[in-house]
Image (cartoon, coloured by chain):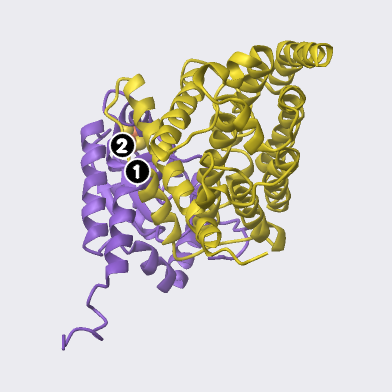
Amino acid sequence: MSFDWIKLLGFIVTPLIASAVGFTYMGLSRKITARVQNRIGPGISQSFIDVVKLYSKKTAINHGLMQHMGPVFAITASITTLLFLPVIKDSIFFANFSFRGDLIFLIYIMVFGQLGMALGAGQTGNPNSAIGVSRGLSQMVGFKVPYVMALVAIMIHAKSTNLQEIIAVQDGFRNWMVFQMPLASLAGLLAYLGYMGYAPFDVPFAPAELASGPPSEFGGKYLALMMTSRSIFTFAKLVLFVDVFFGGASNFIELLIKTFLLYLFALFVGLVNPRFRTEQSIQFWWKWPTAIGALALLLVAWKG
Amino acid sequence: MNPNINDKDSRKIVDIIQSYAQKHSLWVLAYGTGCGAIEIPPTMTSRYDAERFGITGRPTPRMADVLLITGYLATKTLKRVIRSYEQMQSPKYVIGFGSCTINGGMYWDSYNTIKSLDHYLPVDVYINGCMPRPEAVISGFVKLQEMISNGTANGWEKYRDNLDLYRSQQKEVIKNWQMPDYNW
Ligand code: SF4
């Protein structure tokens, strides 16, 4: 196998673009939240300013090795997730590591960052962090069920576990997975709401009751690293859901439009909802989304 | 050749970016000690919208940049305030809010409140009034931003350099000092 310079450049450029887009979306979300609440709100670049400020803090406290490693695990997992996604359809530059069976690999690797964060937050010894971690992990058990059911149904339907082939199945607007497989897509998109962590599913972070949960003992550069990781991971999740359910994107503009609309969906649901309690949120996912996902699985197994 | 290139006082481009970011992103830990705390919610929410200056509330001292002390401090509360201040990551700033932090205000002859906050913590900006209105609070924050951009908001350095002095003054009012030592 020859060494591919174009691909190497892609590996370097993709995370940079991802974090830039992620921070811009976070800034836009703050602006939109402000407009919904009849405020003027901060500028779009506010997230960039915040993260630069955090990186320029002069002191950083940690309580041990694991807290040091937690944000590093998180950012590693975010970049890995991103590098296994075909960001733009049929492009060598952005295809990255996409390989046969990458969707199954992604289901596993997307948990890794949260587990690393859980270990890191656990070492801080802050009770709020511990409660936040336990809530976050139980919530993950909740929304992973419909999420995996939806993805398995789609994999059976497309007869492939490769994301690029799944994108290839959905060429043309009317062949998007949301129209081919409405039930599986409904389950998947509900699970997506849980992934984004906006209200009503912001159970683990709950700033008013848990003092922001797992990251409550992280300050300065640790927090900056976590924010960077979050921006990359947000973009990676959006790209994954656009690839699986909305037919991917053949150029960058299309990608931005599709991901931003998907982001707005989660944001608007979050803006008009209060927060669930932990058991309410798990009950929510184990009722309707799971039932819809199971139905989709049965239908696709019966047909195919 | 530029003669200032090795001058310690010349500002590098990194410093300019950093001070810009520090100026425009102030995360506040609002320590609601006294009655003045009632003016914080209107400052932060829709009516006065402090977020357009990059000022947002943060729930924990580890994340915060600005410690906002809203009013009188009982000696018991002072202990917690000192602990919170020392957990913050520098550069960090203190804003004293209301006459009570300046000279004791209407509690000037009380037996269990401190009279002047800057004997115990390095205050960067005072906002006077009993209680100051949200406009005054925001103008205090703008003053702090000006001080950050011209490099005079260095209370945290003063605290670090004169730690012994501050400690002895703190221990004068806090009799049962049972706290761990300072960790930066
Ligand atoms: S300055 Fe006035 S409003 Fe503020 S804490 Fe003191 S008495 Fe209360």
Q: Chain of mark 1?
A: A
Q: Is residue A105 left or right of residue B115?
A: right
Is residue A152 visible in this depiction of the protein? yes
Q: How far from the left and from the top, in percent, is residue A195?
A: 62, 31
Ligand 1 closer than 8 Å to the CB at disc 2?
no
Choose between A173 and A52: the one closer to the eye.
Answer: A173
Choose between A83 and B51: the one closer to the eye.
Answer: A83
Residue at screen point 21% across, 54% down: B146
Query: Circle 2 is placed at which residue position?
Result: A42
Q: How far from the left and from the top, in percent, is residue A176?
A: 57, 21
Q: Is residue A79 left or right of residue B18?
A: right
Q: How far from the left and from the top, in percent, is residue B158?
A: 36, 68
Query: Circle 1 is placed at which residue position?
Result: A46
The answer for how far apart the CA atoms under marks 1 and 2 are is 6 Å
Q: How far from the left and from the top, in percent, is residue A173?
A: 50, 19
Q: Which color was chain A given?
A: yellow
Amino acid on which the number 2 mark rests in the picture: Pro
Residue at screen point 75% across, 41% down: A101
Query: Is the Cβ of the residue at disc 1 closer than 8 Å to that at disc 2?
Result: yes
Residue B148, by quadrant, is bottom left
Q: Note whether A208 is above or below B177 in the view shown.
A: above
Secondary structure, mark 1, is helix
Amino acid on which the number 1 mark rests in the picture: Gln
Q: Is residue A16 left or right of residue A68?
A: left
Choose between A116 and B11: the one closer to the eye.
Answer: A116
